[in-house]
Amino acid sequence: EGTLTLKNLILKNTNDSAIQVNSGLVTVNGTLLNTNSADFGGAVYCSGGEFNSTDDMFIDASVQGSGSAIFAKDSQLVMDNATFTNKNPITWSLIYGSSSNIEISNSVFANIASKYATAIYNSGLTTVKKSKFINLTANATAGAIAIKGGNPTNYTYLTVDECEFINVSAARNGGAIFADINGDGTNCNGGLVNIQNALFDKNSAEFGGALLQLRGVLIVSNSTFTNNIVNENGGAIY
C-alpha cells in the first residue's frame, strides 16, 4: 500500500476511469475531472482503498453500469467542497457505494437526471453534511440519495445534517431520499436514518414526496418541509 496526492490537475476525456484506487490512499485537491468514462466509475474507481477529495469538480462522466462519477467498493470515500454536474444519461447514481463508508460535506449536486438514486447510493455507512441537491430527477426511485442494507453491529447508516433538497423528484418512491433498511434480507436489521437541520422544498414522488423509508429507525429533527407533493401517499414522509 502507498499514498498518492494529485493537486490542481485537469483529467479529461479518459476511458477506464481517470483514477483507479485498488489499495492505499489517494488524495485529490483542486482538480477538474471532465468527460471521463468507464464501465463503472467514470472519474474514480475505488476498490479496497481510500479516496479523499477536496475542492474538485466532476463534470459529465459516463459509465455503462453504476457510479457515473465515482464507484466505491469496500472503500473509504471522503469528499469536501465537491461539485457534480452531468448532462449524460445516468442509470444508477453519480456516486455508487457498495459496503463503503462515504462522507460528503459542503458539496453541490445540480441539474442531473438518472434512473435511480441520482446523487448517492450506498449499502454502507453514509454521512452527508452541509450539501445541496438541486434540480435532480430519477425516473424510478430516489431523486437524490438511496441507502440499502443495515447491520445491528453498525447501527447508523445515513446521517443528513444541514443539507438542502430543492426541486428533487422521483417517479416512484422517495422524492429526495429512499432508505431500504431491510433491503438485504436477514442481514439487515436495526438500521438508522438520522436527518437534522435540513430543508426539503418542492420535492415530489408517487410515495414519499421528500422521503420514503422501509423499516428501521427514522429520526427527523429541526428540519423544514415545504411544497412537497405526491401522487399517492406521504406528502413529506412515508
Image (tube, helix red, strand yellow):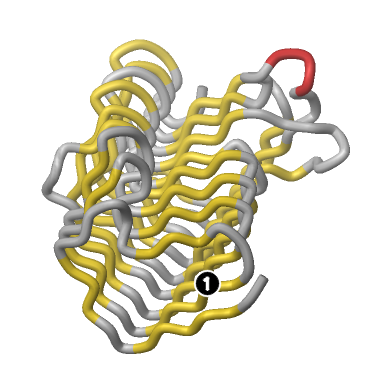
Please name whichever residue, 171 or 100, is drawn nearer the observer in this view of the structure. 100
Identify the residue at horizontal 23%, vertical 54% (top origin). 15
Q: Which residue is mark 1?
A: 52
In the image: residue 97, left or right of residue 101: left
Please name whichever residue, 91 or 160, is drawn nearer the observer in this view of the structure. 91
Q: Is residue 129 above or below residue 213?
A: below
In the image: residue 130, left or right of residue 124: left
Q: Where residue 39 sits: x, y (%)? A: 31, 40
Task: Residue at the far left: name it.
Answer: 87
Q: Is residue 20 above or below residue 206?
A: below
Name the quadrant containing residue 151: top right
User: In what element is the residue under mark 1?
Assistant: strand
Q: Is residue 99 above or below residue 185?
A: below
Identify the residue at horizontal 44%, vertical 71% (top origin). 106
Identify the residue at horizontal 52%, vertical 80% (top origin). 4
Task: Residue at the far right: name it.
Answer: 153
Please name whichever residue, 45 or 169, is drawn nearer the observer in this view of the structure. 45
The amino acid on which the numbered mark 1 sits, given as a three-letter code, is Asn
